[in-house]
């Protein structure tokens, strides 16, 4: 069983719409959650981090965390064609001496102009 | 965010040769370095974790004698792919980390093509 699961997509949304990206994780004790964006041929770049239940907003991005359901999501408002990329969900499992992250396989988002 | 550099950004080599990839954290001291590999249309795969001044810990299935990691200083780590073969062609990405800092940043990556 995968530790971090994402729908591979592609998720296609029209320009200006809200894109909703979802992620579930298996380690109930996980404390830290991250969303990365990866453009084709480039390395991942951090978009959001979230540590507490609820919503965290940063510009057009909102991360949502529900630890009881082991679910974290990313909402992108007013989606733009430049948002088209693969979005990676990453989770830091409970315990361990390092900051090792477990990554999902990513969801490909395509914003249609 | 953190400033991380990798060199070279792209490398093409013949089968059987060795390739060294450098990763530098330019604005903080990395106590831990993660090395990832990414094949086309796949997610990041952690290869190994190294702490400054000690031997790297390799993930299952990653040959430690083939992928040599050196983390001799807090700002520089190297990954050497020894006797590279076409199946080693991939996108290699480093990720320096500071103990206690939750967020992990990535280098720009090195695309390796072995002919």
Image (tube, coloured by chain):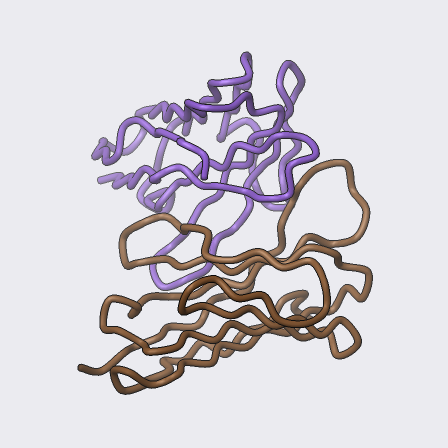
Chain colours: A brown, B purple
Left or right, residue A68 beside residue B16: right
Q: Position of residue A112 (x, y in %)?
A: 22, 82
The residue lying toward the viewer, choosing from A30 and B8, is: A30
Q: Residue at x 41, y 22 (%)?
A: B26
Left or right, residue A55 beside residue B19: right
Task: Name, please, the residue furthest toward the left.
Answer: A113
The answer to whether A58 is drawn above or below residue B114 in the figure is below
Left or right, residue A10 beside residue A6: left
**How many labels sit on residues?**
0
Left or right, residue A106 beside residue B14: right
Quadrant of the frame with the C terminus of chain A: bottom left
Q: Position of residue B80 (x, y in %)?
A: 42, 25
The residue lying toward the viewer, choosing from A109 and A74, is: A74
The residue lying toward the viewer, choosing from B18 and B97, is: B97
Q: Residue at x 54, y 63 (%)?
A: A89
In which quadrant of the rendered view does residue B115 lie?
top left
The answer to whether A36 is drawn above or below residue B74 in the figure is below
Q: Residue at x 36, y 47 (%)?
A: B87
Q: Position of residue A5 (x, y in %)?
A: 59, 72
In which quadrant of the rendered view does residue B73 lie?
top right
Quadrant of the frame with the N terminus of chain A: bottom right
Q: Residue at x 32, y 37 (%)?
A: B110
Q: Position of residue A6 (x, y in %)?
A: 54, 74
In which quadrant of the rendered view does residue A10 lie?
bottom left
């Amino acid at each position: 069983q995968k530790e971090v699961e994402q729908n591979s997509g592609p998720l296609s949304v029209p320009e200006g719409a809200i894109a909703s990206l979802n992620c579930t994780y298996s380690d109930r004790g996980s404390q830290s959650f991250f969303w990365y964006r990866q453009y084709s041929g480039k390395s991942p770049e951090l978009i959001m981090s979230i540590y507490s239940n609820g919503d965290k907003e940063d510009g057009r991005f909102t991360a949502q965390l529900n630890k009881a359901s082991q679910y974290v999501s990313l909402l992108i408002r007013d989606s733009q064609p430049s948002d088209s990329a693969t979005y990676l969900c990453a989770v830091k499992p409970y315990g361990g001496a390092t900051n090792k992250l477990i990554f999902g396989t990513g969801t490909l988002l395509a914003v249609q102009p | 965010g953190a400033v991380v550099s990798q060199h070279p950004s792209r490398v093409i080599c013949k089968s059987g040769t060795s390739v060294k990839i450098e990763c530098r954290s330019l604005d903080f001291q990395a106590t831990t370095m993660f090395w990832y590999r990414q094949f086309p249309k796949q997610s990041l795969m952690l290869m190994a974790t190294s702490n400054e001044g000690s031997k790297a810990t390799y993930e299952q299935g990653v040959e430690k004698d083939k992928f040599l990691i050196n983390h001799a200083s807090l700002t520089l780590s190297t990954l050497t792919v020894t006797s590279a073969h076409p199946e080693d062609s991939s996108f290699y990405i480093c990720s320096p980390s500071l103990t206690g800092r939750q967020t992990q940043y990535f280098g720009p990556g090195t695309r390796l093509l072995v002919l």
